[in-house]
Amino acid sequence: MRAIVHSLTRAAWHFCALTMAIVLPALVHAQPADDAQPVKALTTSSSGALLMLRDSSLFAVEGGSSTEITLPATDQGAKPTSLTRGADGSVYLAGPGLGMWRYDSASEIWQSLNDTLPNLGVTALAAHATQPGTLYAYLGKDGMFRSRDGGTEWVKVDSGPREPVQAFLHSDMPGSMESGWLYAGTTRGVARSMDCFCFWGDAGDLRGTVSAISYDPAAPENVYAVIEGQLHHSADGGETWTSLEIPQPVTALAFSPAQGLVVGTVNGNLFARGAAGEWTPVHD
Amino acid sequence: MIKWISALALLIVPVLAGASDGPVSADNAPPEVHQGRQVYEQYCAACHGWQGEGADDWKKPNEKGEMPAPPHDDTGHTWRHSDAMLFKMIAEGWRHPFNKSDRLTMPAFGESLTNQEIGAVIEYLKSLWTDEQREYQAKESQ
């Protein structure tokens, strides 16, 4: 009896080992691009294509098809989390362990902008709405850094709002003492400062952890923020907010010159918002 | 031992007191700063405080829905603005876009003060900042 049990156990082990040997290589070589992965970040390219960060892959979505853009080669553990477009159309990528990078679409080369940053722990980035060389990087407890020369020299300019920043935005909404406004999505809601970093105050009484923030460049008083998948809209620069109907929980936002407000969802889909507030799928 | 400590203190304390990592003493300030202080006391101090300390709770709108006058000393944000921007603010005034009233948050003094007087006020404000803030503001002014 003991011999039979021993034989069965050995057979079971062999079966498991064989199964693992077949399945594991297939899993390792599986494409990371999975339509069901949440969209982590969105922006637009200078050609008008939507750039979508899903899992750890970047895709350009245009004309009903998507093309994968190879991400910069970085150390293991680097997490791309943020995307934005500069005033000159340059695309910037950032994330913890990754620092900040600029993509040259003509040469398809990523350029590191990390030489003068204190570390690679960039958790949020923003690009000035009208000044091509001005960039902002948030490095958690190390504070907020600004570059005015396209990322060559970074200078610490502020500690940032009291709560950690999850999403960052520069807006050219009028009324600032300087050249615009900064909106920071924090764990408490939306904080706002003129871009002199004069002081951070609450933008209205929207509360919760903000995971994405965007604004309408054609009507800058219109600001959008996502809290726990719910999309909120302010028509007065962040003073008051209303909740918008959405097809699926939202994870990323961008303003496309052609499509207006586009959201990326927890299911990996993209939807564009029409003039009447209706949502139309953006097919990739 | 006590004598040694006292002697050491006599040596060190004047050095620390002479270090300029903070607001400049009005006593040894240039004449323009003296003039700026006089102008400041006449036109600005009523709102921004006699020592540039600003209004209480200046980061929140007051009961009228207006942003109170901020400090001009090292606790405020004046040092974050270039000379040109400070001049413009004093000469032309400014309205905070989120104020509930339509009036200027910062009144315009371009009719009351000469360009030289405005420049003197700005020089006086600089005397209220730390060395680090003056350095930051000098770069902003370039």
Image (spheres, helix red, strand yellow):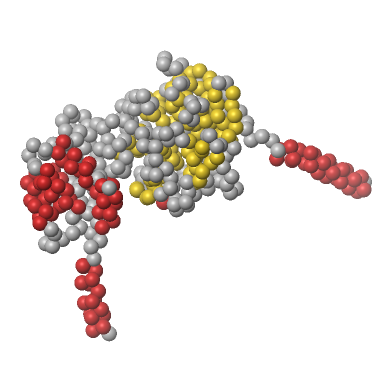
Quarter in which the C terminus of chain A is drawn: top right
Q: Going by the image, does A233 lie left or right of A94?
A: left
Q: Going by the image, does A9 lie left or right of A111?
A: right
Q: Which residue occupies the extreme top position in the image? A: A276
Residue at 30% from the left image edge and 36% from the top image edge: A179
Q: Is residue B105 above or below residue A247?
A: below
Q: Nearer the viewer, residue A110 or A173?
A: A110
Observer able to see residue A40: no
* x, y percent for residue A20: 77, 41
Q: Nearer the viewer, residue A162 or A124?
A: A124
* x, y percent for residue B15: 23, 71
Residue at 34% from the left image edge and 27% from the top image edge: A220
Q: Is residue A66 above or below residue A164?
A: above
Q: Nearer the viewer, residue A105 or A228?
A: A105
How many marks are shown on the rendered structure? 0
The picture quadrant where one finds residue B57 is top left
Q: Going by the image, does B24 lie left or right of B133?
A: left
* x, y percent for residue A21: 79, 42
Q: Nearer the viewer, residue B84 or A200?
A: B84
* x, y percent for residue A169: 39, 36
Observer able to see residue B60: yes
The picture quadrant where one finds residue A185 is top left
Residue at 25% from the left image edge and 61% from the top image edge: B21
